Image (tube, coloured by chain):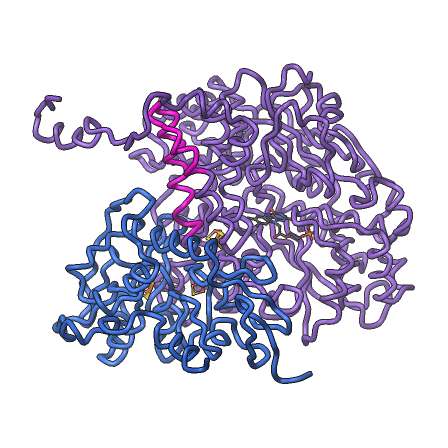
């Protein structure tokens, strides 16, 4: 074990900032990170044990206990539940004889929950030993468990056809489906790899930035920051080295369009990173890829290899002296907050994914304290087309404030869940038509994931765009048969509780208190004061450091705004105060231990 | 560029050195902005959020925000004060703070701020979490019940080669601050005392002596928190 670990540590040049990679390799090799390995890594890297431990214990996919030869991570997002996760989960437990969070006594299988894995259009889905299993049914679960007991390899357990497009290529071989339902100017295949790199070799970096600025395009990662401006800031920032990060953490429940781009348009994305590098004067790019998408690793590496061979990456690209750029892939290890750009940088430096205080912004002081651009996958793809066809061309799509197109990830109660590229300016009603959901069958639409808003039919005429309903692209359609409070809102609150990094007092504590209020109301113990408290307490979260905490009350606040009657129906009308305290529950444990029956 | 900048806090005109953090700039102008996770000389990490102010209408933490020319800072408004009070209440309900039995009582910054903001009964339900006391280290006791997870000890105390002695574990509501098993054993008397002094509450205590400071001589017995800074302003007027 000792020499094995040494080899891993040496593979990454005994570099502390590569701790994530080291831990991922150890986790893959041993199935967990035993204490003695933690101690050894600390020693080899000149860190203390708690230094290593604080990174390990932060990430969902690192474990300090054995996770089983086969480790099953079953998605527990709201949409997974809508699509029948409960029976699937139940069957797993029954067939394996364990509960979630446990490993079978023979050490063969571990069963765990996990936050949205980016497969909302094909739920219920699970990750087993880094492979994705979609559209699970109780029957399929029985097959999987049988195969596991027979010792089959993960690849042999796949019985259905592989998914469409590259999903069936030799290097992926996955059942994941793309579900691309609508192609627009960004996804369109009218582009030859290298074509735009060739073009920029004849442009100055400033000209490239000007073209992007002219397009008025804004970042597609959610915050909507103007891309050209971001690049210009970074170009003008002083630093001996600069970096381009592609944010492929895609953790917002309900979002999966970046996964489809990575599968089908990886060349376009990498070309976008090269362009960004040229524009800001960076020679290193890092694709920060969520661990859930590890099944794409071999495929993406192969594309990078081909690009290097064609000199689209490497030194003196396409003969242009001093135009150097290369890309490496950095995996995360299961933490939604790492999608926040400064947390992503911290994580890539081998640390806990805790967002940084701003200022300074990453463009001034980012990765390894150097000026760094962080852009979303979709942003970097769009940029290629902007430089190819010009900023004016791009502006011809969409509205004045929201130029171009947007990739939507649509899931939930509709006929055609999947990825749609639409021009900005669509209304929610238009989208519902497009995805095969009749407005009269739709109770609500969750726009922009848990951190966004849940809206009802009276707002379906609102327009998607920065002017009105901004969205990172996730739309979850919720039919009439769903219980918004218990199926959606509660699930989203649990999500924020699980994913808070825990460093701000507000974001660490309040989501739990708010969730408890919701539970009290669902338990028919709520009073009007509880509703008032939710509104007042929700505001406090605005004082949190990053977007996660700032929006963590949104599931409750927006449902309270648009579906207040659901709360009012559940509270007690004739009571002003209820502590919510349940004496029977409180003494249950001690009664069981003493064999007494409470008398009240 | 001039070395000095002018800005206002609650419409009071202030002056400071460019690049100074807002809390420090305010202090020099005789204005108290409450802090918990911040500590002089230690790199700030806005985690407690108690120093939140509004800068040009936007919520920002004063311990991490450098002053800039023309900033309008809102510090003592009803809204900000209630926000701060609610954060103190959150910290009280999150842990187990039985002040009368705590050695830091009277010198504790959390308690002092609770007095300043006139906290009586927190608006939030007590969580009464199960937390342990780690007394396995020769020099110090780490009482997790009282830890407000401010990270002061983490940031301020390392060994000679920069290795952490204190560190976070886990995330979210499960976060805890733990002591390195090996380095904790090698802690010198001097560092142990420094750790106890740096901790704003009674979560790090030096072993084998207790209640050293008599009631009446404790840090906040005679002058409430912030009064030293605010007295500067009164004398200025
Ligand atoms: C909690 C949180 C999670 C985020 N997750 C992502 C993500 O998964 N992907 C992404 O591109 N941006 C995400 N963002 C936004 C990033 O911080 C950042 O704004 C974005 O990557 C910038 O890229 P863009 O300018 O191309 O939009 C997240 C932000 C927050 C606060
Ligand atoms: S808001 Fe939440 S996730 Fe963001 S830094 Fe604060 S504690 Fe961490
Ligand atoms: S032990 Fe004290 S200094 Fe360290 S994080 Fe806890 S409260 Fe802060
Ligand atoms: S003192 Fe500024 S956030 Fe804690």
Q: Is residue B17 left or right of residue A511?
A: right
Quadrant showing the N terminus of chain A: bottom left
Q: Is residue A227 above or below residue B210?
A: above
Residue A160: percent from left, percent from top: 60, 23
Q: Quadrant of residue A232?
A: bottom right
Residue ranking furthest to the front: B237
Residue at 51 percent of width and 76 percent of height:
B25
Chain seen in blue: B
Q: Is residue A4 visible?
A: no
Q: Is residue A81 above or below residue B108?
A: above
Residue at 44 percent of width and 20 percent of height:
A569
Question: Which region of the structure is painted magenta?
Answer: A506-534
Near-viewer residue (A242 or A464)? A464
Q: Is residue A517 magenta?
A: yes
Q: Is residue A419 left or right of residue A549?
A: right
Quadrant showing the C terminus of chain A: top left
Q: Quadrant of ligand 3?
A: bottom left
Q: Is residue A495 left or right of residue B157?
A: right
Q: Is residue A416 left or right of residue B15?
A: right
Q: Is residue A248 magenta?
A: no
Near-viewer residue (B224 or A468)? B224
Q: Is residue B197 visible?
A: yes
Write down the colour of chain A: purple
């Amino acid at each position: 074990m000792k020499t094995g670990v040494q080899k891993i540590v040496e593979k990454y040049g005994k570099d502390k900032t590569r701790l994530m990679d080291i831990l991922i390799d150890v986790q893959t090799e041993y199935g967990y990170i035993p204490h003695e390995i933690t101690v050894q890594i600390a020693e080899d890297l000149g860190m203390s044990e708690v230094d290593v431990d604080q990174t390990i214990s932060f990430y969902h996919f690192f474990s300090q206990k054995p996770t089983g030869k086969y480790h099953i991570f079953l998605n527990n997002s709201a949409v997974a539940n809508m699509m029948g996760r409960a029976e699937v989960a139940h069957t797993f437990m029954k067939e394996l004889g364990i509960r979630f969070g446990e490993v079978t006594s023979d050490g063969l299988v571990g069963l765990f929950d996990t936050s949205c894995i980016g497969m909302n259009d094909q739920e219920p889905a699970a990750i087993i030993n880094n492979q994705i299993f979609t559209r699970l049914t109780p029957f399929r679960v029985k097959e999987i468990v049988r195969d596991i007991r027979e010792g089959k390899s993960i690849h042999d357990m796949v019985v259905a056809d592989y998914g469409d497009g590259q999903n069936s290529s030799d290097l992926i071989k996955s059942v994941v489906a793309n579900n691309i339902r609508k192609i627009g100017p960004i996804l369109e295949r009218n582009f030859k790899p290298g074509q735009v790199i060739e073009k920029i070799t004849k442009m100055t970096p400033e000209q490239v930035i000007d073209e992007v600025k002219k397009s008025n395009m804004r970042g597609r990662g959610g915050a909507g920051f103007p891309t050209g401006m971001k690049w210009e800031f970074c170009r003008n920032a002083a630093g001996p080295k600069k970096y381009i990060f592609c944010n492929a953490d895609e953790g917002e429940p309900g979002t999966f369009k970046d996964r489809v781009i990575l599968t089908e348009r990886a060349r376009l994305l990498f070309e976008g990173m090269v362009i960004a590098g040229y524009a800001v004067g960076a020679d290193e790019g890092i694709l920060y890829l969520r661990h859930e998408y590890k099944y794409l690793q071999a495929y993406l590496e192969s594309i990078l290899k081909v690009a290097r061979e064609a000199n689209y990456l490497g030194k003196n690209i396409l003969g242009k002296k001093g135009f150097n750029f290369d890309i490496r892939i950095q995996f995360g290890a299961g933490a939604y907050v790492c999608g926040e750009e400064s947390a992503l940088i911290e994580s890539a430096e081998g640390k806990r994914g805790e967002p940084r205080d701003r200022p300074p912004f990453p463009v001034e002081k980012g990765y390894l304290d150097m000026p760094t651009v962080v852009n979303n996958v979709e942003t970097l793809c769009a940029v290629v087309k902007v430089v190819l066809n010009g900023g004016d061309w791009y502006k011809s799509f969409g509205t004045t404030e929201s130029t171009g197109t947007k990739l939507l990830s649509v899931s939930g109660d509709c006929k055609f869940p999947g990825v749609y590229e639409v021009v900005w300016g669509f209304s929610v009603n238009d989208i519902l038509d497009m995805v095969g959901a009749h407005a009269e069958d739709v109770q609500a639409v969750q726009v922009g994931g848990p951190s966004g808003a849940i809206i009802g039919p009276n707002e379906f005429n609102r327009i998607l765009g920065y002017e009105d309903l901004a969205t990172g692209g996730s739309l979850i359609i919720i039919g009439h048969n769903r219980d918004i409070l218990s199926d959606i809102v509660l699930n989203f609150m649990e999500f924020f509780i699980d994913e808070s990094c825990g460093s701000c007092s507000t974001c660490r504590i309040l989501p739990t208190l708010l969730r408890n209020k919701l539970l009290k109301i669902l338990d028919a113990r709520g009073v009007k004061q509880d509703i008032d408290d939710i509104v007042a307490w929700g505001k406090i979260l605005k004082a949190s450091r990053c977007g996660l905490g700032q929006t963590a009350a949104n599931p409750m606040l927006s449902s309270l705004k648009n579906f207040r009657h659901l709360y009012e129906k559940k509270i007690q009308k004739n009571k002003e105060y209820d502590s919510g305290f349940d004496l029977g529950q409180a003494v249950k444990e001690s009664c069981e231990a003493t064999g007494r029956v409470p008398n009240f | 560029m001039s070395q000095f900048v002018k800005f206002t806090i609650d419409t009071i005109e202030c002056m400071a050195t460019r690049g100074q953090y807002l809390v420090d700039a305010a202090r020099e102008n005789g204005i108290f902005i409450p802090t918990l996770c911040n500590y002089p000389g230690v790199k700030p990490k806005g985690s407690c959020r108690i120093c939140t102010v509004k800068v040009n209408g936007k919520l920002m933490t004063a311990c991490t925000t450098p002053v800039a020319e023309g900033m309008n800072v809102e510090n003592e408004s009803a809204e900000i004060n209630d926000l701060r009070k609610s954060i103190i209440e959150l910290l009280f309900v999150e842990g187990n703070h039985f002040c009368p039995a705590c050695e830091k009582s009277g010198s504790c910054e959390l308690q002092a701020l609770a007095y300043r903001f006139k906290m009586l009964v927190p608006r939030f339900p007590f969580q009464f979490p199960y937390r342990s006391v780690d007394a396995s280290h020769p020099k110090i006791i780490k009482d997790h019940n009282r830890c407000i997870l401010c990270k002061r000890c983490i940031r301020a105390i390392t060994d000679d080669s920069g290795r952490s002695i204190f560190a976070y574990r886990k995330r979210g509501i499960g976060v805890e601050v733990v002591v390195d098993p090996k380095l904790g054993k090698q802690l010198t008397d001097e560092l142990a005392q420094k750790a106890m002094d740096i901790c704003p509450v009674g979560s790090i205590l030096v072993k084998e002596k207790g209640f050293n400071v008599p009631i009446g001589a404790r840090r906040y017995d005679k002058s409430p928190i912030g009064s030293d800074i605010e007295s500067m302003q009164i004398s200025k007027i």
